[in-house]
C-alpha cells in the first residue's frame, strides 16, 4: 500500500520511519505541506493518505482524493473533526484514527499549563534572564483546596482529574453527557449540569471533542456563569471556544488567566515557523497580546511516548486495512 503522509515534520518522519522498520506492505511518501484543496493532487499514485489535526479534509478535498484513487485515510491523531465523514462514507473512503496514544501527555501538559498561568513561570523565566528579580506581579494561589471543573471525562479528562485530586488535593468536579463508571476511582465527582460546573469552578479545563454540539461550548453566556477571576484551560480543540467572547471576557477583566494549546483558526500558523511573518488574524494577535494569556502551539501531545504510539498504531491501521479492507480503529464503524 502506497501512503502519502501529509504535513510531516522531522519528528513525524523519524517516528513513522522507525515504526515502519518492523513492518511490511506499507510504503510511505513524506510530504511537507498540509492537505487542502491545493495540495490534494500530491496524493495521486497512492492508495491511502495519512493526515493530522490541521489537514483539511472537507467534501471538496475528499472528491479530489477519490478522483486520485485514494481508498483510505489514516488519521495520526484521535480527534476527527477535520474530516467530512459523511462524504468519505459516500465515496467509500475508509477513515481510521489513533484513539488513544498517550492521554498522560495531554493531561500532564494541561496541569502544567494551569501551574504556568497561576504561578507565572513564563514571566519569571524571562525576568530572571534579564536580571530582574522583583516578585511584583507574580502573585499566584495554591491549587490545593481549589475546585477544578473538567468538561469531558474521557481518557484525558480522567487523568487530568486524577493528577489534580490525588496529587494536588483539589476538589475535582466534572461534566460529561456520558459519565464514566470509574470517575470516582480517579477522584472526580460529577455535577448534573454544565452550568453548575461553570458556577463552582476556580479553574475550568476542556477535555471534550469538537463536535457540532460542543462548538463554542465556551461563549458569552457560559463565560458569564463562571466566577470572576476564573482560569480557563483549553488543550482540546480551538473551536470549543468562541474567541470573540473570550476576548470580551478578558478585556472586561472577568477572566483571571487563560491557557490555550489550541486556537480555532490555528491551521494558518501552527506547526510552522511564522516568526518572520505578519499575523493577519487580528483575533489571534489580540489573544497573544493579553498579559494573562499563555499560548502554546498544539504541543500537548508531543512526548516521545505519544509519538511512538501514534506511529505504531498508524502503521498497524494501514496494514490492517491493506490485509483485510477494514480496521479495528475505523471511524464510524
Ligand atoms: P475521549 O473520546 O476519550 O473523551 C472525550 C469525552 O468528552 C467523552 O467522555 C465524551 O462523552 C465527552 N463529551 C462529549 N461531548 C461532551 C459535552 N458536550 N460536554 C462534556 N463532555 C462531552 O477523548 P480524549 O482522548 O480524552 O481526548 C479529548 C480531546 O482532547 C480530543 O477530542 C482532542 O480534541 C483533544 N486532544 C488534544 C491534543 C493536543 O495535543 N492538544 C492531543 C490529543 C487529544
Image (tube, rainbow, N blue to C red):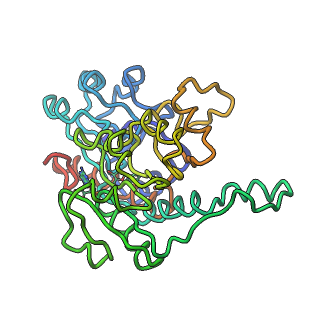
- Give percent across and percent down for residue 116: 59, 60
For the point 44% across and 78% down, the residue is 169
The answer to which image quadrant residue 176 occupies is bottom left
- Left or right, 141 with respect to 320, comes to right
Residue 261 shown left or right of residue 157 in the figure = right
Q: Is residue 284 above or below residue 104?
A: above
Q: Nearer the viewer, residue 209 or 4?
A: 209
Residue under the image location 61 percent in, 64 percent down: 140
**What is the tally of numbered marks visible in this picture?**
0
Which of the 4 quarters of the picture holds residue 162?
A: bottom left
Q: Residue at (49%, 75%) from the top-left corner? A: 144
Examine the image and state in which quarter residue 155 appears: bottom left
Give the residue furthest to the right. Answer: 131
Relative to 290, is 230 above or below? below
- Residue 172 or residue 76, whichever sits in front: 172
Q: Quadrant of ligand 1?
A: bottom left
Residue 201: x and y, percent? Answer: 38, 61
- Give the residue displayed 25% in from the left and 27% down from the top: 69
Q: Report the quarter where the N terminus lies.
A: top left
Q: Position of residue 56 (x, y in %)?
A: 36, 31
- Is 10 drawn above or below residue 277 in the view shown? below
Image position, residue 91 (x, y; %) = 16, 28
Q: In this orientation, which residue lies closer to the viewer: 143 or 114?
A: 143
Amino acid at each position: 500500500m502506497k501512503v502519502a503522509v501529509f504535513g510531516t515534520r522531522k519528528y513525524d518522519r523519524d517516528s513513522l520511519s522507525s515504526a515502519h522498520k518492523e513492518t511490511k506492505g506499507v510504503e510511505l511518501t513524506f510530504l511537507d505541506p498540509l492537505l487542502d484543496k491545493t495540495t490534494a493532487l500530491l496524493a495521486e499514485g497512492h492508495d491511502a493518505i495519512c493526515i493530522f489535526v490541521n489537514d483539511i479534509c472537507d467534501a471538496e478535498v475528499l472528491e479530489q482524493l477519490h478522483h486520485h484513487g485514494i481508498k483510505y485515510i489514516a488519521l495520526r491523531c484521535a480527534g476527527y473533526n477535520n474530516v467530512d465523514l459523511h462524504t468519505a462514507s459516500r465515496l467509500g473512503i475508509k477513515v481510521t484514527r489513533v484513539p488513544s496514544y498517550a492521554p498522560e501527555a495531554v493531561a500532564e501538559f494541561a496541569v502544567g499549563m494551569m501551574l504556568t498561568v497561576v504561578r507565572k513561570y513564563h514571566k519569571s523565566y524571562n525576568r530572571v534572564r534579564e536580571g530582574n528579580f522583583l516578585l511584583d506581579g507574580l502573585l499566584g494561589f495554591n491549587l490545593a483546596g481549589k475546585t477544578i471543573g473538567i468538561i469531558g471525562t474521557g481518557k484525558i479528562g480522567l487523568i487530568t482529574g486524577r493528577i489534580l485530586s490525588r496529587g494536588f488535593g483539589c476538589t475535582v468536579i466534572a461534566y460529561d453527557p456520558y459519565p464514566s463508571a470509574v470517575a470516582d476511582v480517579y477522584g472526580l465527582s460529577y455535577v448534573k449540569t454544565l452550568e453548575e460546573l461553570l458556577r463552582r469552578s476556580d479553574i475550568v479545563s476542556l477535555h471534550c471533542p469538537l463536535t457540532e454540539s460542543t462548538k463554542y461550548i465556551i461563549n458569552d453566556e457560559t463565560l458569564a456563569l463562571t466566577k470572576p477571576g476564573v482560569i480557563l484551560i483549553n488543550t482540546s480543540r480551538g473551536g470549543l471556544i468562541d474567541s470573540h467572547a473570550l476576548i470580551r471576557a478578558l478585556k472586561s477583566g472577568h477572566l483571571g488567566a487563560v491557557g490555550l494549546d489550541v486556537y480555532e483558526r490555528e491551521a494558518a500558523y501552527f506547526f510552522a515557523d511564522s516568526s518572520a511573518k505578519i499575523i493577519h488574524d487580528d483575533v489571534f494577535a489580540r489573544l497573544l497580546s493579553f498579559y494573562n494569556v499563555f499560548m502554546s502551539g498544539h504541543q500537548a501531545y508531543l512526548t516521545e511516548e505519544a509519538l511512538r504510539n501514534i506511529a505504531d498504531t498508524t502503521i498497524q491501521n494501514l496494514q490492517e486495512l491493506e490485509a483485510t479492507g477494514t480496521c479495528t480503529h475505523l471511524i464510524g464503524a
